[in-house]
Image (cartoon, helix red, strand yellow):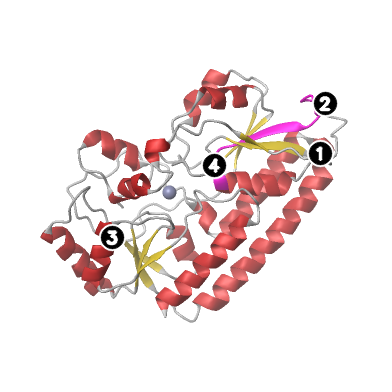
Amino acid sequence: MIVNCTGLRTGRQRSGILPIIALLMLSMATGCSQSNRNQGTTSEQSPQAQEAVSTPRLQSGKTKIVTTFLPIYLFTKAVAGNVADVEILVPPGTEVHEYQATPENVKAIATANVLVKNGLGLEVFLENTVKNAQNPKLTEIDASKGIKPLNEISPVVKTTQEEKDQEHTQGNPHVWLDPILAKQQVTNIRDGLIAADPANKATYEANAAAYVKELESLNSEFQQTLQKTPSCTFITFHDAFPYLAKRYNLKQVAVVQIPEDQLSPTDVQNAVNAVKKYKVKALFSEPGVDNKLLVSLSKDLKLTLRPLDSLETGETDPQHYFQAMKANLQTLETACK
Ligand SMILES: [Zn+2]
């Protein structure tokens, strides 16, 4: 596996060649170059929210929860509802894999009761940020607790001489893209919140149960739809979908990495060979990405380039998860036909 997101940072330090995923991120309207422009944390406050009287913490009396990035925010917000204040450290539209913490992030953690992270090595920025926040009362929830990470999942086409990522020791972090593992994350978040704020146990349980039910029905939808196209094989430019692929019997055969400015004939030939070898049906990029290299590569491969959403950015309504995942399902269904 070449382009493991946590490898981007090291890849960039190591050589002048950007892995394609980094290129994608840069080409997005709100990509890396703007990483830290958007510094504020988003706070959700609801006037009609119930007061958590027995755990007087913030001035509002509510438990203050900070979450790292979008999927974890969505899951936590779904579980917390209005009984706790939920903030997000990495603003939507900002690259999580290479995120650099801001002073506001340190402040947010310093004044929080609970920190929820995806874990599996995704939030590289957290370690120092938490240290700098010096908050001995902070409870940390690892949403991926108990999830067995996948490592190398597929043959990978390597079109540049990039070294293998050495720091990617905790496996692939993109577990939220499998509804069943998302369910486990929601359950982990629920249990962590109950432990930190037992006064609101009933609310956390009820909210989590409702969200889990939706995840289960999403899972059924994926199963029913994708069983019609077993072993559908695809190539991606962001190694975000191994858990989804494993769950629904798809095959992510390659994560293509291409150089920054121009595809060499060898790059193209390697990708074409992979398409032939693995009988690839689909080529996926990400929503909002308009990259000429990818378009020209897709033409060479005679495959339609379609967007598959890794949910690393998007809207902050907890229902956004289901909307984006259903759009992904439609894309997969069309591409795998
Ligand atoms: Zn990613």
What is the spatial separation of the Cα atoms under label 2 and label 1, in whole angstroms? 17 Å
Q: Is residue 271 above or below residue 137?
A: below
What is the spatial separation of the Cα atoms under label 1 and label 3, in whole angstroms? 47 Å
What is the spatial separation of the Cα atoms under label 2 and label 4, in whole angstroms? 27 Å
In the picture, which quadrant includes the C terminus?
bottom left
What is the spatial separation of the Cα atoms under label 4 and label 3, in whole angstroms? 27 Å
Q: Residue at x 50, y 65 (%)?
A: 328
What is the spatial separation of the Cα atoms under label 1 and label 4, in whole angstroms? 24 Å
The residue that label 2 is drawn on is 56
Whichever of labels 1 and 4 marks the residue nearer the N terminus, that label is 1
Q: Which residues are magenta?
A: 56-70
Would you call the spot at circle 4 few (<14 residues within 10 Å), some (14-19), or many (20 or more)?
Answer: many
Amino acid marked by disc 1: Pro
Q: Residue at x 46, y 47 (%)?
A: 173
The residue that label 1 is drawn on is 47
Of 287 and 19, nearer the camera is 287
Whichever of labels 4 and 3 marks the residue nearer the N terminus, that label is 4
The residue that label 4 is drawn on is 69
Disc 1 or disc 4, which is closer to the eye? 1
